[in-house]
Image (tube, rainbow, N blue to C red):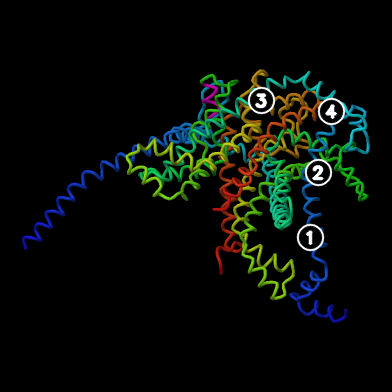
Amino acid sequence: MSMLTRRRSEARQTARDLAPKRPRTRRRSFWIGVAFASPFIVGFLGLFAYPILASGYYSFTDFNLFQSPDWVGLDNYEQMANDDVFWKSLANTLVLAVMGVPLTIAIALGGAHLLNTPIKGQPLYRAVIYLPSIIPIVVGGYLWRWLLNTQYGFVNYFLSWFGISGPSWLQEPDWTKPAIVLVVLWTVGGTMIIYLAALKDVPHELYEAASIDGAGPWRRFLNVTWPTVSPVTLFQVIVCLIAYLQIFTEPYVLAQERLNNISSGPDQSMLTYAMYLYQNAFVYLKMGYASAMAWVLFIVTLIVTLVVLASSKRWVHYGSK
Amino acid sequence: MAQSETQIMTDAASPRELPATRRTPKILRRLRQHGLVIALALVFIFPLLVMISTALKSPQDVFSSPPTLIPSEWTFNNFATAFDQIPVWRYLGNTMLVAGLSVLGTALSCPLVAYALSKVRWAGAKPLFIMVLATMMLPPQVTLIPLFLIWNGVGATNTYLPLVVPAFLGTPFFIFLIRQFLMNVPDDLLEAARLDGASELRTYATIVLPIARPAIVTAAVFQFVWAWTDFLNPLIYLNDESTYTLSIGLYAFFGENDVAWGPLMAACTMFTIPALIIFLIGQKFFIGGISAGAIK
């Protein structure tokens, strides 16, 4: 009895010892966390939270930099619905995404497959393929304008070897989008390297088992490789889609005529959403309209991402089944 | 022959591939594979060879049809013209300054935040991490205009502040990268130091930073290339020619001389070299970093 009470009081004693300590250390580690995270806390408030709120507010105003924003309700969004150029830029962007994303995935996976063999100098080849991705897009843009030159460019010269008379890539409205996709594809190396890392993780026994079952290379790809890398494919599709929805520098540089900052290719065929947004904000100084466009872009991005995620249940396989 | 044909028709998954590959000698298969890989690499490097070759050609050579890769007469005149018309050293210096400060900012701020999000036990770790993820998803266009108005309001256009300050406040993508790396570091390592009475800052400096070095270097190399190749931000914030970075300088040069392909390619070559050097030095960090971002 007495021993029990003593134990109890001891326990109470230790509990008392611990109790005041814990909040103190917890409070201490809270402030340590705040201190270490402070750059991002400031950055989040200043570079994200306030600008997001401000941009939301501007999207309901008429605002041109020189006078304070004037509340106009949903006018900007209504104007957008009736703005042919807005729809054109959105359509151009979606066409680029629909052409570019599947090609990126196919070429990246195909190239990774080729690279995923034990050959000498593999790191070198990998580096060479990644190299274009670190070159300034402006440099790449001008370089490809030269390569795509109808008269003196190498692309049409190579096509002529196969008896194809190449188009005037940057002058014909139908060919400007393939040209943009081509320039973007030159920087597919990053995507390819991610696939290469994923392919290295595919268990070798699966291929052996498939071979024993009599599967040829195509069947092995369909039944082993594709399902195994499908989670990575989902990631790549989303990243690539978002990049296409925001594409700016490649079309801007390919469409550039002299120092005219609103040139957008023949028949505005290279005018992407981000380019039109830039024009509205920094050329026409329609800051309110451009902010509204930014929000619509955000919503379009969200919808497209959610659609891809929803579809993924049908084609993405997680773990071993 | 007839037998194998019926086999193909009756069974799509027939074992026809195995004997076929066995028939091709191993060396030939290796050669074919190697040849394909070389061809693939050539496709990617060819444009760069054209860039360098055009830069070294004389004007009549540049405009020859069909195009040739090897100049018939080598000349450095295009480089001289480019240096003459573009203040290359100034733009190079400006870009170095922007890229250097951005790298410094990232290397200082991102590991600090990543540490707070992975190894400090506090209530804010989870919500802040969600915010890091959310800001990674946000299209930069949403914040573009208010940020421009802020910087314009404090008179910071035509300075490098708008390009550099964000790096010191932690770039979400790099915080994420380093945080993922630190999550795999066992807590015991840090606990030992803490029990020895080391202050949090000391633990961070002597234990966390050295361990996280590969992730920090990866972030730094990527930040360098981002800053080096950035176009939109300099386009918006830099209007004064003396502040131009390489991208904008090249853009302006093309705007004035759009058919001077020789000098233009010479300028492009010069603007590519520094990125190339960084790439060669940091190659393994690039390759490792890309894969680390996607596959956890």
Q: CA distance from mark 4 to mark 1?
A: 41 Å
Name the mark nearer the viewer: 1 or 3: 1
Same chain? Circles 2 and 4 = no
Q: Which residue is mark 4?
A: B262
Task: Tell me if residue B151 is in the magenta stretch.
Answer: yes
Marks 3 and 4 sit apart, C-alpha to C-alpha, by: 21 Å
Q: Secondary structure at mark 2?
A: helix
- Local crowd size for mark 3, using a 10 Å CA cut-off: few (<14), some (14–19), many (≥20): many
Question: Measured from the top left, where is residue A258 in percent x and y?
Answer: 77, 26
Are discs 2 and 3 located on one and the same chain?
no
Under mark 3, the amino acid is Thr
- The residue under label 1 is B30
> Considering only vertical position in the picture, is A314 above or below A262?
below
**Mark 2 packing: few (<14 Cα in 10 Å), some, or many (20+)?**
some
Reply yes or no: does residue B12 show up in magenta.
no
* Label placed on residue A178: none
Q: Earlier in the sequence, mark 3 or mark 4?
A: 3
Q: Provide the secondary structure element on which disc 3 rests.
A: loop
- Numbered badge on residue A175: 2
Q: Residues within 10 Å of mark 1 (few under 14, many from 20)?
A: some
Quarter of the image holding residue A272? top right
Residue B245 numbered tag: 3
How far, Cα to Cα, is label 1 from label 3? 46 Å
Q: What span is colored magenta in the figure? A: B147-153
